[in-house]
Image (cartoon, rainbow, N blue to C red):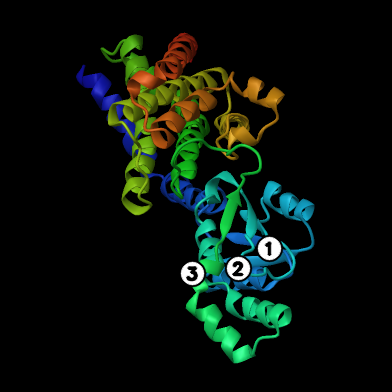
Amino acid sequence: MSKVVAITTTSLRRFLRTKENLFFVFGFPILIIFFVGIQFGGGVAATLVVVGDSVVADTVVQETEAAGMGVERVDDRDEAEEWVARGWAQAAAIVPDGDPWAGDTVEIEYLASGAAVTELLGPIQAAVASSNLGPMVTRAVVETTGADPDDARASVEASAETITRTEVDTEVVGDPLFEGDIELFDIGASSQLVLFTFLTSLSTSGYLILTRKLGVARRMLSTPTSVGRIVAGETVGRYAIAVVQALFIVVFSALIFGVDWGDPWGSTAVMALFSLVATGAGILLGSIMKSDAAAGGIGVMLGIGLGALGGGMVPYELFPETLQQVARFTPHLWALEAFRVLLFEDGTIADITTQLAVLAGMGVVVLAVSVWFYRRSIVEA
């Protein structure tokens, strides 16, 4: 047992000693989490599109700008829908043209993406409440009754609450991209955890090849160390590397970005099982390849490719339906589905049993195959 621990700690220490790993394993994922959070989190630089030519529309623009958000004016509802659907703006306000008369109801149609339903609605409601309807009503009174403007203005101000009644009808175009309560960095944190945990396991598979080339495994076999102990030590070492990568992202994102990983038992189970799959994939690649340089390059390509397909770079909800079905063959998608339930829907470990079962099955199969190949590579070295 002591030899297994020694091999494990040596693998982990060798991994952490490499300076490049300190950035690409620890620094780079955090930067990606930040940028993905800005793009998909729905809480930064929100933009409202306004349609309409009236004092009410002008007031909506003013209130939104005063709230520190972006505003764009477009010509019609179709153009506003396109802005929201394509993600150029988070919401749109369609305001009726013309200024309302006394007793009129102002109906503002509000179109929003799932992440900005309430964020941009506040300035619109404030705009409607503060719209300068007094002068419009005063003019209407003067034009229809011929009353003195000063007397009309005084009467309007006295009965302002009665004649400035407004209603707002709201409508969200399409379905929300993500269900549940989403914070700014939640999406990036979970996706980068699965992407980099798998990528690191594959890209560092060259260490196993280098160990064989340098005769380290052969020298260990010349001592009272069995093949099984060598395999066990390297496997646990690879697994420790994957877990360290995942734990760093979990802890750092929680402390710095405020990511709530939900049920700790559920998150731990997903992280542990996904790390098992990643470990098996890394050992398999390191066992069947002959060149450590080639294994590193192929590992990076496979890690990025499978990560992208499984939703580790762009949320898989944006994929076409056919591609989403193909992505179900990757462990990334199952891990991300589990994290979606835990992070966005306040689920527990009982709500992700299907995802955990799939990850466990993948982990057992891949690890069993990789261990068989690794044992053979050591014996033949």
Amino acid at the residue labelled 1: Val
- Along the polypeptide, which appears first: circle 3 or circle 2? 2
Amino acid at the residue labelled 2: Val
Residue at image mark 2: 60
- Along the polypeptide, which appears first: circle 1 or circle 3? 1
Residue at image mark 1: 50
The Cα–Cα distance between marks 1 and 3, rounded to whole angstroms, is 26 Å
Which residue corresponds to the image point at 41% horizontal and 47% vertical from the top-left?
Answer: 26
Q: Nearer the viewer, residue 176 or 300?
A: 176
Q: Nearer the viewer, residue 184 or 149?
A: 149
Which residue corresponds to the image point at 31% horizontal and 14% vertical from the top-left?
Answer: 229
The reply, left or right, for residue 80 in relation to residue 102 is right
Which residue is most to the left? 2
Which residue corresponds to the image point at 29% horizontal and 26% vertical from the top-left?
Answer: 265
The Cα–Cα distance between marks 3 and 2, rounded to whole angstroms, is 20 Å
Q: Which element is circle 1 on?
A: strand
The Cα–Cα distance between marks 2 and 1, rounded to whole angstroms, is 8 Å
Regarding residue 213, the answer to whether it shows in the image is: no
Amino acid at the residue labelled 3: Glu
Badge 2: few (under 14), some or many (20 or more) residues near its Cα, within 10 Å? many
Regarding residue 29, the answer to whether it shows in the image is: yes
Which residue corresponds to the image point at 61% horizontal and 61% vertical from the top-left?
Answer: 47
Q: Are marks 2 and 1 in contact (CB under 8 Å)?
A: yes
Residue 360 pos. (x, y %):
42, 14
Q: Nearer the viewer, residue 110 or 222?
A: 110
Q: Where is residue 13, by image quadrant? A: top left
Please give the count of numbered marks on the rendered protein: 3
Residue 83 pos. (x, y %):
71, 53
Residue at image mark 3: 161
Residue 8 pos. (x, y %):
30, 26
Q: Quadrant of the N terminus?
A: top left
